[in-house]
Image (cartoon, grey):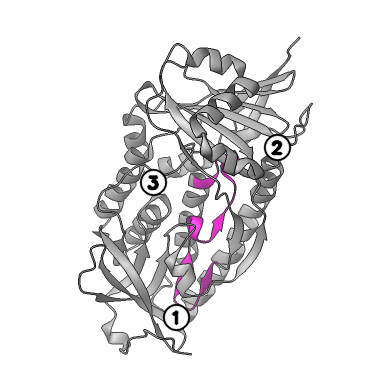
């Protein structure tokens, strides 16, 4: 089947092995790994400069272990974001303290600002040989006989289109993925929205990773760069309209009800930025692959941010895709087999955390807890009088 917008051409016209659409954590890490494997990679992104993204920032130990394995972790640490080696979780009258679960000997989690993390990954991709084009939009995909063979690009300003061809197009362009829309990627699994979230950055808070829960409420403090702490408040989805109408006061009110100790600490500091937030906390798996295309990161799978899994999932998917492709990209049959293997293993790897996240996102307090947030190894349990 040939779709509208397809361009004629021969296999000899292929210039790139891979075109990656999107240059944030999923796209940049995928492009870097495929370039390190020896492939010629083009990476495009709509943004002209890298800005902060809507994000909880937290990178779980498997994600930190990936950064270490890729020799990128030293740059992340050099940004000054503190190592997060202890977690304190409060649920009703129970307080759990412990450490994040180690992965490959990595003892700490990190939560760098995205305006610092994403450029580090982009630089690593470029150093690996990736051709990076910011300020470039993908207007359409190229199809031949039902197979994706490239993209039509233009600048965000609407300049003339260019045709770029590749053996594989990677959609790493987020939850509202253009690539997913153009290939009509089927939704394999979808669940209702459960929460909305609002957060800001605050000065003067102790550099402690803490989470607090109560029925219908959830609050977290996540230390990040420059002495700032991300303070996040989660609300049930049905409250989104009301919360959005007065987000700063709604956030403060949620903190005061759920984590009064944090609200007292906030009085000694001040808000550093405006309040960020969203009610679009989708929960889904899309089909991950098809002829000539594959989805990574939020383009293929998204879940509520209450468990802060997004960045770590993106890194794991990037590594999994590179491992599955191996040296088989040049042969269409080998590539097809590799992409199917990636899709199967992605679902196996991410489905348990997806189900666990939905359980957390319902915010139905369970005390004492049979599970713990953020991959925590408990070494102390306290009872609040």
Say which of 14 and 204 sits in front. Answer: 204
Count neighbours of disc 2 (C-alpha within 10 A) and say few if under 14, some if 14 to 19, many if 20 or more. many
Identify the image quadrant of residue 90.
Answer: top right
The residue located at (65%, 47%) in the rendering is 353
Q: Which comes before the other along the chain, label 3 or label 1? A: 3
Q: Are marks 2 and 3 in contact (CB under 8 Å)?
A: no
Identify the image quadrant of residue 211.
Answer: top right
**Label drawn at residue 141:** none
Q: Which comes before the other along the chain, label 2 or label 3? A: 3
- Does 151 appear above or below 322? below
> Left or right: where does residue 43 sit relative to residue 279?
left
Q: Look at mark 3 in the image and give the residue it sits on.
A: 70
> Which range of residues does the magenta coloring cover?
288-310
Mark 2 vs mark 3, CA separation in Å: 36 Å
Q: Secondary structure at mark 2?
A: loop
Please provide percent x and percent y for residue 245. 52, 38
**Label drawn at residue 363:** 2
Mark 2 vs mark 1, CA separation in Å: 46 Å
Let me know if residue 294 appears in the view: yes
> Left or right: where does residue 293 sit relative to residue 129?
right
Q: Are marks 3 and 1 in contact (CB under 8 Å)?
A: no
- Mark 2 against mark 3, which lies toward the viewer? 2
Count neighbours of disc 1 (C-alpha within 10 A) and say few if under 14, some if 14 to 19, many if 20 or more. some
**Label drawn at residue 332:** 1
Whether residue 339 is in magenta: the answer is no
């Amino acid at each position: 089947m040939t779709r509208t917008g397809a361009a004629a051409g021969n296999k000899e016209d292929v210039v790139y092995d891979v075109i990656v659409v999107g240059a944030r954590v999923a796209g940049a890490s995928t492009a870097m790994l495929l370039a390190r494997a020896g492939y010629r990679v083009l990476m495009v992104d709509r943004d002209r400069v890298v800005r902060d993204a809507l994000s909880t920032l937290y990178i779980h130990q498997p994600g930190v272990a990936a950064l270490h394995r890729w020799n990128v972790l030293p740059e992340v640490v050099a940004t000054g974001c503190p190592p997060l080696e202890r977690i304190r979780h409060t649920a009703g009258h129970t307080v759990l303290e412990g450490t994040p679960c180690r992965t490959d000997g990595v003892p700490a989690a990190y939560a760098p600002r995205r305006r610092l993390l994403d450029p580090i990954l982009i630089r690593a991709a470029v150093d690996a040989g990736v051709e990076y084009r910011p300020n470039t939009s993908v207007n359409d995909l190229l199809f031949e006989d039902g197979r994706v063979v490239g993209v039509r690009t233009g600048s965000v300003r609407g300049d003339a289109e260019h045709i770029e061809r590749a053996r594989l197009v990677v959609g790493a362009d987020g939850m509202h993925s253009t690539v997913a829309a153009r290939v009509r990627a089927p939704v394999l699994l979808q669940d209702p929205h459960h929460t909305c979230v609002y957060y800001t950055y605050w000065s003067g808070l102790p550099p402690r990773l803490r989470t607090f829960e109560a029925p219908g409420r959830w609050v977290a403090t996540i230390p990040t760069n420059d002495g700032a702490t991300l303070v996040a408040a989660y609300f049930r989805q049905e409250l989104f309209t009301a919360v959005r109408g007065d987000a700063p006061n709604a956030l403060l009110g949620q903190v005061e009800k759920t984590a009064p100790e944090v609200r007292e600490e906030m009085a000694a500091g001040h808000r550093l930025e405006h309040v960020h937030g969203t009610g679009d906390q989708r929960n889904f798996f899309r089909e991950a692959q098809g002829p000539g295309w594959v989805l990574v990161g939020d383009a293929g799978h998204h879940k509520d941010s209450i468990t802060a899994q997004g960045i770590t999932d993106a890194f794991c998917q990037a590594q999994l895709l590179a491992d599955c492709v191996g040296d088989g990209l040049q042969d269409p049959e080998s590539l097809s087999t590799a992409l199917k293997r990636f899709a199967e293993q992605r679902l196996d790897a991410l489905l348990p955390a997806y189900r666990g996240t939905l359980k957390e996102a319902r915010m139905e307090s369970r005390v004492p807890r049979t599970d713990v947030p953020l991959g925590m190894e408990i070494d102390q349990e306290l009872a609040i009088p």
